[in-house]
Image (cartoon, helix red, strand yellow):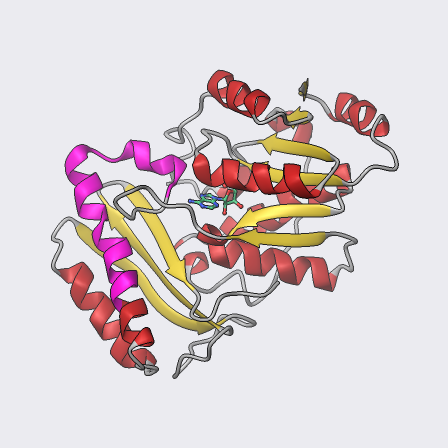
Amino acid sequence: MRTCRGIASLRRALAACAGKQVGLVPTMGFLHEGHLSLVRACRRECDVTVVSIFVNPAQFGPSEDLRRYPRDERRDSALLRQEQVDVLFVPGENEMYPSPYRTWVDVTGLDSKLCGRSRPGHFRGVATVVLKLLHLMRPQRAYFGQKDAQQALLIRQLVRDLNLPVTLRILPIVRDSDGLALSSRNVLLSARERRAALALPRCLRRASGLVEAGETNARALRAAMAAEIAREPLLTIDYIAIVRLDDLEDAAEIAAGNTLVAAAVRVGRTRLIDNFIPGGMSC
Ligand code: AMP
Protein backbone atom coordinates (compact mmCIF):
# COMPACT_ATOMS: atom_id res chain seq x y z
CA MET A 1 0.00 0.00 0.00
CA ARG A 2 1.34 3.39 -0.94
CA THR A 3 0.49 6.19 1.51
CA CYS A 4 0.23 9.66 -0.01
CA ARG A 5 0.00 12.75 2.15
CA GLY A 6 0.17 15.29 -0.62
CA ILE A 7 -1.64 15.84 -3.90
CA ALA A 8 1.57 15.65 -5.93
CA SER A 9 2.44 12.22 -4.56
CA LEU A 10 -1.18 11.06 -5.04
CA ARG A 11 -0.98 12.14 -8.70
CA ARG A 12 2.25 10.18 -9.14
CA ALA A 13 0.73 7.07 -7.55
CA LEU A 14 -2.36 7.31 -9.77
CA ALA A 15 -0.34 7.98 -12.93
CA ALA A 16 1.11 4.51 -12.43
CA CYS A 17 -2.47 3.11 -12.60
CA ALA A 18 -3.37 4.55 -16.02
CA GLY A 19 -5.76 2.31 -17.96
CA LYS A 20 -6.94 0.50 -14.84
CA GLN A 21 -10.34 0.68 -13.16
CA VAL A 22 -9.89 2.85 -10.08
CA GLY A 23 -12.29 2.73 -7.13
CA LEU A 24 -12.42 5.32 -4.37
CA VAL A 25 -13.61 4.86 -0.79
CA PRO A 26 -13.71 8.24 0.99
CA THR A 27 -13.66 8.06 4.80
CA MET A 28 -12.90 10.07 7.90
CA GLY A 29 -10.94 7.16 9.36
CA PHE A 30 -11.22 5.33 12.70
CA LEU A 31 -12.23 2.46 10.51
CA HIS A 32 -14.74 -0.26 11.34
CA GLU A 33 -16.41 -3.12 9.49
CA GLY A 34 -18.80 -0.67 7.78
CA HIS A 35 -15.88 1.07 6.10
CA LEU A 36 -14.22 -2.25 5.38
CA SER A 37 -17.36 -3.53 3.64
CA LEU A 38 -16.94 -0.65 1.18
CA VAL A 39 -13.23 -1.38 0.78
CA ARG A 40 -13.93 -5.07 0.10
CA ALA A 41 -16.59 -4.24 -2.50
CA CYS A 42 -14.14 -1.85 -4.15
CA ARG A 43 -11.43 -4.52 -4.18
CA ARG A 44 -13.82 -7.00 -5.80
CA GLU A 45 -15.04 -4.59 -8.46
CA CYS A 46 -11.99 -2.47 -9.35
CA ASP A 47 -8.34 -3.01 -10.31
CA VAL A 48 -7.04 -0.31 -7.99
CA THR A 49 -8.50 0.57 -4.58
CA VAL A 50 -7.89 4.04 -3.23
CA VAL A 51 -9.02 4.93 0.30
CA SER A 52 -8.94 8.46 1.62
CA ILE A 53 -8.87 9.37 5.29
CA PHE A 54 -9.59 13.01 5.95
CA VAL A 55 -11.48 14.39 8.92
CA ASN A 56 -12.95 17.20 6.88
CA PRO A 57 -13.15 20.32 9.05
CA ALA A 58 -15.52 21.95 6.55
CA GLN A 59 -18.32 19.53 7.45
CA PHE A 60 -18.18 20.22 11.18
CA GLY A 61 -20.03 23.20 12.65
CA PRO A 62 -18.28 25.49 15.17
CA SER A 63 -19.99 23.78 18.11
CA GLU A 64 -19.57 20.24 16.75
CA ASP A 65 -17.20 17.45 17.67
CA LEU A 66 -14.27 18.02 15.24
CA ARG A 67 -11.71 17.90 18.07
CA ARG A 68 -13.41 14.96 19.77
CA TYR A 69 -13.69 13.00 16.52
CA PRO A 70 -11.79 9.71 17.07
CA ARG A 71 -8.59 9.16 15.07
CA ASP A 72 -6.06 6.34 14.86
CA GLU A 73 -4.12 6.48 11.63
CA ARG A 74 -1.71 3.73 12.58
CA ARG A 75 -4.50 1.23 13.22
CA ASP A 76 -6.42 2.35 10.11
CA SER A 77 -3.33 1.97 7.99
CA ALA A 78 -2.71 -1.57 9.31
CA LEU A 79 -6.35 -2.54 8.59
CA LEU A 80 -6.16 -1.18 5.04
CA ARG A 81 -2.88 -2.95 4.43
CA GLN A 82 -4.56 -6.20 5.50
CA GLU A 83 -7.35 -5.51 2.99
CA GLN A 84 -4.69 -5.06 0.30
CA VAL A 85 -5.63 -1.49 -0.48
CA ASP A 86 -3.37 -0.01 -3.16
CA VAL A 87 -3.30 3.67 -2.28
CA LEU A 88 -4.10 5.47 0.99
CA PHE A 89 -4.55 9.23 0.70
CA VAL A 90 -4.20 11.06 4.03
CA PRO A 91 -4.04 14.74 3.17
CA GLY A 92 -3.39 17.47 5.67
CA GLU A 93 -5.91 20.27 6.05
CA ASN A 94 -3.73 22.75 4.11
CA GLU A 95 -3.44 20.30 1.25
CA MET A 96 -7.23 20.16 0.82
CA TYR A 97 -8.01 23.76 1.75
CA PRO A 98 -4.98 25.90 0.92
CA SER A 99 -5.44 29.42 2.19
CA PRO A 100 -7.22 31.46 0.93
CA TYR A 101 -9.86 28.85 0.07
CA ARG A 102 -12.99 30.25 -1.61
CA THR A 103 -14.78 27.61 -3.71
CA TRP A 104 -17.71 25.68 -2.28
CA VAL A 105 -20.31 23.29 -3.65
CA ASP A 106 -23.97 23.56 -2.63
CA VAL A 107 -26.44 20.84 -3.54
CA THR A 108 -29.37 23.13 -2.99
CA GLY A 109 -32.56 21.84 -1.45
CA LEU A 110 -31.13 18.48 -0.37
CA ASP A 111 -28.63 20.12 1.98
CA SER A 112 -31.10 21.89 4.24
CA LYS A 113 -33.35 18.94 5.15
CA LEU A 114 -33.00 16.19 7.81
CA CYS A 115 -29.41 16.39 9.13
CA GLY A 116 -28.93 19.71 7.32
CA ARG A 117 -31.46 21.33 9.64
CA SER A 118 -29.40 20.82 12.77
CA ARG A 119 -26.04 20.89 10.95
CA PRO A 120 -26.08 24.01 8.77
CA GLY A 121 -23.13 24.01 6.36
CA HIS A 122 -22.44 20.31 6.92
CA PHE A 123 -23.43 19.16 3.44
CA ARG A 124 -21.63 22.06 1.76
CA GLY A 125 -18.49 20.69 3.42
CA VAL A 126 -19.34 17.13 2.36
CA ALA A 127 -20.17 18.02 -1.26
CA THR A 128 -17.05 20.16 -1.60
CA VAL A 129 -14.64 17.57 -0.25
CA VAL A 130 -16.22 14.71 -2.21
CA LEU A 131 -16.09 16.69 -5.46
CA LYS A 132 -12.45 17.53 -4.76
CA LEU A 133 -11.62 13.87 -4.10
CA LEU A 134 -13.47 12.70 -7.23
CA HIS A 135 -11.69 15.36 -9.26
CA LEU A 136 -8.27 14.45 -7.85
CA MET A 137 -8.60 10.72 -8.32
CA ARG A 138 -10.96 10.40 -11.30
CA PRO A 139 -12.19 6.99 -10.11
CA GLN A 140 -14.55 4.94 -12.28
CA ARG A 141 -16.41 3.93 -9.13
CA ALA A 142 -16.89 5.52 -5.72
CA TYR A 143 -18.24 3.72 -2.66
CA PHE A 144 -20.55 5.13 0.00
CA GLY A 145 -22.64 3.64 2.80
CA GLN A 146 -26.40 3.84 3.13
CA LYS A 147 -25.66 4.60 6.79
CA ASP A 148 -25.32 8.23 5.68
CA ALA A 149 -28.29 8.07 3.34
CA GLN A 150 -28.75 11.80 2.92
CA GLN A 151 -25.06 12.17 2.08
CA ALA A 152 -25.33 9.38 -0.50
CA LEU A 153 -28.42 10.96 -2.10
CA LEU A 154 -26.79 14.37 -2.18
CA ILE A 155 -23.68 12.95 -3.86
CA ARG A 156 -25.88 11.09 -6.35
CA GLN A 157 -27.44 14.44 -7.23
CA LEU A 158 -24.02 16.13 -7.45
CA VAL A 159 -22.78 13.42 -9.82
CA ARG A 160 -25.86 13.81 -12.01
CA ASP A 161 -25.87 17.59 -11.99
CA LEU A 162 -22.18 17.97 -12.83
CA ASN A 163 -22.07 14.99 -15.24
CA LEU A 164 -19.25 13.40 -13.29
CA PRO A 165 -17.99 10.26 -15.02
CA VAL A 166 -18.22 8.02 -11.96
CA THR A 167 -20.51 5.16 -10.96
CA LEU A 168 -21.70 5.40 -7.38
CA ARG A 169 -22.08 2.28 -5.30
CA ILE A 170 -24.20 2.66 -2.18
CA LEU A 171 -23.83 -0.30 0.13
CA PRO A 172 -25.95 -1.57 3.04
CA ILE A 173 -25.56 -0.54 6.66
CA VAL A 174 -23.27 -2.80 8.67
CA ARG A 175 -24.45 -3.27 12.27
CA ASP A 176 -23.00 -4.51 15.52
CA SER A 177 -24.42 -7.80 16.82
CA ASP A 178 -26.87 -5.84 19.02
CA GLY A 179 -28.24 -3.91 16.03
CA LEU A 180 -26.51 -0.54 16.49
CA ALA A 181 -25.21 0.73 13.16
CA LEU A 182 -21.42 0.83 13.24
CA SER A 183 -20.09 4.36 13.47
CA SER A 184 -16.72 5.83 14.39
CA ARG A 185 -18.60 7.95 16.92
CA ASN A 186 -19.86 4.90 18.86
CA VAL A 187 -16.61 4.88 20.88
CA LEU A 188 -17.61 8.25 22.29
CA LEU A 189 -20.58 6.64 24.07
CA SER A 190 -20.37 5.55 27.70
CA ALA A 191 -21.58 2.02 28.46
CA ARG A 192 -24.90 3.45 29.63
CA GLU A 193 -25.28 5.64 26.55
CA ARG A 194 -24.37 2.70 24.32
CA ARG A 195 -27.25 0.67 25.82
CA ALA A 196 -29.63 3.60 25.50
CA ALA A 197 -28.59 4.11 21.86
CA LEU A 198 -30.12 0.75 20.98
CA ALA A 199 -33.52 2.45 21.00
CA LEU A 200 -32.49 3.97 17.64
CA PRO A 201 -32.22 0.71 15.67
CA ARG A 202 -35.19 -0.58 17.68
CA CYS A 203 -37.39 2.26 16.47
CA LEU A 204 -36.37 1.55 12.87
CA ARG A 205 -37.01 -2.18 13.29
CA ARG A 206 -40.43 -1.30 14.71
CA ALA A 207 -41.21 0.84 11.67
CA SER A 208 -39.87 -1.79 9.31
CA GLY A 209 -42.03 -4.45 10.99
CA LEU A 210 -45.10 -2.25 10.62
CA VAL A 211 -44.32 -1.62 6.94
CA GLU A 212 -43.94 -5.36 6.39
CA ALA A 213 -47.30 -5.86 8.06
CA GLY A 214 -48.86 -3.45 5.56
CA GLU A 215 -48.70 -0.04 7.26
CA THR A 216 -47.94 2.67 4.70
CA ASN A 217 -49.09 5.79 6.53
CA ALA A 218 -46.10 8.00 7.36
CA ARG A 219 -47.78 9.73 10.27
CA ALA A 220 -48.60 6.41 11.98
CA LEU A 221 -45.08 5.14 11.39
CA ARG A 222 -43.47 8.30 12.75
CA ALA A 223 -45.66 8.11 15.87
CA ALA A 224 -44.66 4.49 16.49
CA MET A 225 -40.99 5.39 16.07
CA ALA A 226 -41.24 8.40 18.38
CA ALA A 227 -42.95 6.28 21.03
CA GLU A 228 -40.11 3.77 20.89
CA ILE A 229 -37.48 6.51 21.37
CA ALA A 230 -39.52 8.20 24.12
CA ARG A 231 -39.22 5.02 26.23
CA GLU A 232 -35.49 5.69 26.51
CA PRO A 233 -34.94 8.77 28.74
CA LEU A 234 -31.29 9.27 27.72
CA LEU A 235 -32.24 9.89 24.09
CA THR A 236 -33.60 13.05 22.56
CA ILE A 237 -35.01 13.07 19.06
CA ASP A 238 -33.33 15.32 16.52
CA TYR A 239 -35.67 14.15 13.76
CA ILE A 240 -37.79 11.27 12.62
CA ALA A 241 -38.39 11.59 8.90
CA ILE A 242 -40.23 9.71 6.22
CA VAL A 243 -39.28 11.38 2.97
CA ARG A 244 -39.08 10.82 -0.76
CA LEU A 245 -35.65 9.63 -1.92
CA ASP A 246 -35.38 12.02 -4.83
CA ASP A 247 -36.05 15.35 -3.08
CA LEU A 248 -36.20 14.50 0.64
CA GLU A 249 -39.64 16.10 0.89
CA ASP A 250 -42.06 14.57 3.38
CA ALA A 251 -43.89 11.54 2.06
CA ALA A 252 -47.45 10.95 3.23
CA GLU A 253 -47.26 7.26 2.36
CA ILE A 254 -44.46 4.73 1.94
CA ALA A 255 -43.67 4.08 -1.73
CA ALA A 256 -41.43 1.01 -1.96
CA GLY A 257 -38.02 1.88 -3.39
CA ASN A 258 -38.64 5.59 -3.19
CA THR A 259 -38.96 6.37 0.50
CA LEU A 260 -36.34 6.92 3.16
CA VAL A 261 -37.25 6.25 6.79
CA ALA A 262 -34.58 7.98 8.87
CA ALA A 263 -33.98 9.08 12.43
CA ALA A 264 -31.36 11.09 14.28
CA VAL A 265 -31.04 11.18 18.05
CA ARG A 266 -28.77 12.71 20.61
CA VAL A 267 -27.39 10.72 23.48
CA GLY A 268 -25.25 12.84 25.76
CA ARG A 269 -22.94 14.89 23.53
CA THR A 270 -23.12 12.40 20.67
CA ARG A 271 -25.51 12.48 17.72
CA LEU A 272 -26.40 9.20 16.03
CA ILE A 273 -28.26 8.49 12.79
CA ASP A 274 -29.84 5.40 11.26
CA ASN A 275 -32.31 4.60 8.49
CA PHE A 276 -33.92 2.05 6.25
CA ILE A 277 -35.35 2.17 2.76
CA PRO A 278 -38.45 0.01 2.30
CA GLY A 279 -37.92 -1.93 -0.92
CA GLY A 280 -34.23 -0.89 -1.04
CA MET A 281 -32.46 1.83 -2.97
CA SER A 282 -31.34 1.70 -6.57
CA CYS A 283 -28.58 4.14 -7.47
P1 AMP B 1 -17.22 8.20 7.61
O1 AMP B 1 -15.82 7.77 7.90
O2 AMP B 1 -18.12 8.12 8.79
O3 AMP B 1 -17.29 9.50 6.87
O4 AMP B 1 -17.80 7.12 6.59
C1 AMP B 1 -17.14 6.83 5.38
C2 AMP B 1 -18.07 5.99 4.55
O5 AMP B 1 -18.39 4.80 5.23
C3 AMP B 1 -19.40 6.70 4.25
O6 AMP B 1 -19.78 6.46 2.92
C4 AMP B 1 -20.33 6.06 5.24
O7 AMP B 1 -21.68 6.06 4.82
C5 AMP B 1 -19.78 4.64 5.27
N1 AMP B 1 -20.20 3.99 6.53
C6 AMP B 1 -20.08 4.48 7.78
N2 AMP B 1 -20.65 3.64 8.67
C7 AMP B 1 -21.14 2.60 7.96
C8 AMP B 1 -21.85 1.40 8.29
N3 AMP B 1 -22.17 1.11 9.55
N4 AMP B 1 -22.20 0.57 7.29
C9 AMP B 1 -21.89 0.86 6.00
N5 AMP B 1 -21.23 1.96 5.62
C10 AMP B 1 -20.85 2.82 6.57
Find residue 65 and report its horizontal and vertical position in percent.
38, 36
Find residue 83 and report its horizontal and vertical position in percent.
57, 27
Q: Is residue 140 above or below residue 157?
A: above
Q: Residue at x 50, y 58 (%)?
A: 150
Residue 9 part of the magenta segment: no
Describe residue 60's horizontal placement relative to residue 141 as left or right.
left
Residue nearest the viewer, comparing 84 with 183: 84
Find residue 128 and report its horizontal and vertical position in percent.
64, 47
Q: Is residue 241 above or below residue 266?
A: below
Residue 193 part of the magenta segment: yes
Residues shaded magenta: 182-206
- Single out the residue that lies furthest toward the top: 74
Describe residue 265's horizontal placement relative to residue 97 as left or right.
left
Residue nearest the viewer, comparing 33 with 110: 33
The quarter of the picture where residue 21 lies is top right
Find residue 222 and report its horizontal and vertical position in percent.
28, 72
The quarter of the picture where residue 236 lies is bottom left
Q: Residue at x 40, y 31 (%)?
A: 69
Predominant SS of the magenta segment: helix
Q: Is residue 119 above or below residue 108?
A: above
Describe residue 100's horizontal placement relative to residue 201 as left or right.
right
Residue nearest the viewer, comparing 242 with 117: 242
